[in-house]
Amino acid sequence: MSYREERRADEALKAEQARKNAELRAEQAREDRRLEVEAKLKAKEIEAEQKRKDAELRAEQARKDAEAKRRQELADKRARAQEKERKQAARRAKVAKVTRWVNGNPVTMFVGFVMVCSIVPAVISQVGALADAGVFVLLAALLSAMLEGTAWALTFMGKQAEDAGRPAGKYRVATWVTAFLAAAVNYWHWAEALPGHTWVAIVFAASSLIAIYLWDMKTHGSHGKTKEQRREEKARRKHLAARRKDHKDIAAEADRLLSALPFGSITEEEAFATAWRIKKGAEPGLSAEVYANATNARVALGAAFELGEHVRPELVRAGMLATLYNPLPHRLSEGIPTLGPTLPLPALQRPSEGATALAGIGMYGSEAASEKAREKANGKASGNAGDDASGNGRRGRSDEELEALLPEALKVAAELVAEGNQISAAALSKRLGIRRDDARRLRDRVIAERKLKLVDGDGDTELAG
């Protein structure tokens, strides 16, 4: 290839290369413009999104502010309503308090009203009296207030002293002296001003006294003792006088106890009860004589029941039926009054059973006692039958043998009393295993021995058992 051809080829290559470079630059410029446009669009989108978010935030904040404002307004409204209700409740409470006081203290209200109606005319009258005498009106008012105020100051001082438990007599006397002095001033003035109308002077003089009189009656006349309290105090004084008359030695012992012990440590009733225990050895109202009488009565009742064991059944039953037709009024449906439980009328329709039923236990006693009596009677009947069958009945015990059995019989008697039963021959016979006749003799010895121990004061343990 020649030089020119090579040169043309180089120039062609250069031209081709320049064309390609120009195309590349143009393509790069287009790409740069595209990227720039996209960047601007993206920036606008971001800006628009930010504006939207800012608008949403501002709207949300405005909504929250409006809600907070609404809530605050509601809270303020509720607070105002509550405050209004509180004030209304306070006013209602004050009105109710005043109403309750008026309803509960009508006397005080009317006394206060009358006192005002009495004091005001009295003060005005005294001011007029002093002014007519040539005293300056202000001085007359002060002097009148001094006179009436002194009376009321003394009145309230006496009330305070009385509430504190101090003597109030001197205050009451001074109050009435001052009140009468004010009344004299009013009477003197109106007697001279209206000589033909003395009653007017009396009315104005009374105006200085009525208020003091009403207050004195209210504070001293309405707090006295009731009729029931006075009756109770009278009965107590009568009771104490009778006690000192009937129990002089015990009352004297009680006085010694009161003087010996510290003041106020025991009451008079406690001192008397203690003195009774010292003198009598028992609770107030009881004594050895009372216990002895009660024991004698129980012994006599037991003897009456024992007596019924030797009475024929038809006689006892006839006596019971005779009581049903007693002309004296009594309630048959409830049985005959006794010391213990009673049976109704249908119980009499049953035939008597056993020897102890003949003494009235079946009617006057309880059903359990009747059943026990029947068992004892059946046991006695079987024992007698056995003796008769053998033909060798035991002989009665001698006095020496009964005397030897006496300590054991006393223990059995104490057990019977503790169980609430009578000291009977049947019980002694069953528990000691001796004949009925021997038991009767031993019972008499036991009763006599217990009486002696009661009188001597040595049988307290047995009686308590």
Image (cartoon, helix red, strand yellow):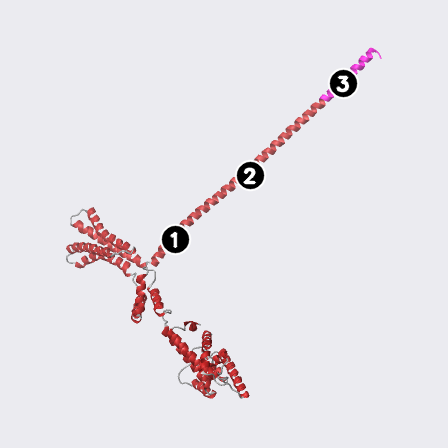
Residues at marks 1 and 3, CA–CA distance in whole angstroms: 110 Å
From the top left corner, tell me how far across and down residue 168 is, in percent.
25, 56
Q: Residue at position x 56%, y 37% from top?
A: 57
| Residue 135 lies within the magenta run | no
The tag on residue 30 is none
| Residue 7 lies within the magenta run | yes
Q: On the image, numbered disc 3 is attached to which residue?
A: 17
Q: Disc 1 or disc 2, which is closer to the eye?
A: 1
Read off the magenta span. 1-25
Q: On the image, numbered disc 2 is attached to which residue?
A: 60
Q: On the image, numbered disc 1 is attached to which residue?
A: 93
First reached walking from the N terminus: tag 1 or tag 2: 2
Amino acid type of the residue tagged 1 in the rendering:
Ala
Amino acid type of the residue tagged 3 in the rendering:
Gln
Q: Secondary structure at mark 1?
A: helix
Q: Secondary structure at mark 3?
A: helix
Residues at marks 3 and 2, CA–CA distance in whole angstroms: 63 Å
From the top left corner, tell me how far across and down residue 361 is, in percent.
46, 81
The one of 274 and 45 positioned closer to us in this rendering = 274
Amino acid type of the residue tagged 2 in the rendering:
Glu
Query: How many residues crowd mark 3 within 10 Å: few (<14), some (14–19), many (20+)?
Result: few
